[in-house]
Amino acid sequence: QVQLVESGGGLVQAGGSLRLSCGASGSIFSINSVKWFRQAPGKQREMVATIRSDGSTLYTDSVKGRFTISRDNAKNTVYLHMNGLKPEDTAVYYCNAQIRSLSQYMGSLPPEDYWGQGTQVTVSS
């Protein structure tokens, strides 16, 4: 059973920093792209940052220059470093990953999408 667990959210003042973690556990063969999404109250979920298996990254315009996504393949963990936080960054942040489990690899099956439970980030003005 593969699981994704996020951590690192909290309350921070505008201009502050947080580091979110997304850890994958279970019988994992490989992790492809990993994405951070966020959803603010009354708004649609939006993609914030993506890191592919080759390490290339993609960011939504509103966080470019402030957020950095990185991955530690040895720990099956992806991080979202958030600097210069603004009140409009307040949201529940979710991790999404394409993961192929060992059983999927053995069965020549494609990877599946997994979601974490979300972590709340609140930025006060």
Image: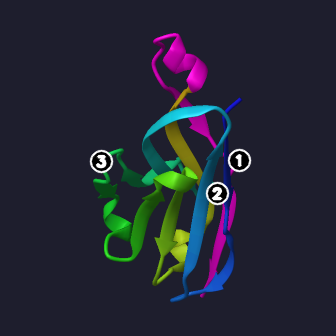
* Residue bearing the label numbered 3: 54
Circle 2 packing at 10 Å, graded few (<14), some (14-19), many (20+), is few
Cα gap from disc 2 to disc 1, whole angstroms: 16 Å
Is residue 37 visible from the viewing direction of this image? Answer: no
Identify residue for label 2.
41
Residue marked by disc 1: 117
| Pick the front one: 104 or 34 | 104
Question: For the magenta stretch, what is the residue range?
Answer: 102-125
Indicate the position of residue 21 as horizontal and vertical percent values. 60, 62
Say above or below: 102 vs 114.
above
**Residue 49, relative to residue 87: is it above or below?**
above
- At a point 29% along the width and 47% down the height, the residue shown is 54
Q: What x and y, as percent, mark residue 68?
A: 40, 69
Which amino acid type corresponds to the residue marked 2 in the rendered image?
A: Pro
Q: Amino acid at mark 1?
A: Gln
The tag earlier along the polypeptide, 1 or 3, is 3
Labels 1, 3: front one: 3
Identify the secondary structure beneath mark 1: loop
Labels 2, 1: front one = 1
Q: Is residue 106 magenta?
A: yes
Q: Which of disc 1 and disc 2 is earlier in sequence?
A: 2
The three-letter code of the residue at mark 3 reads Asp
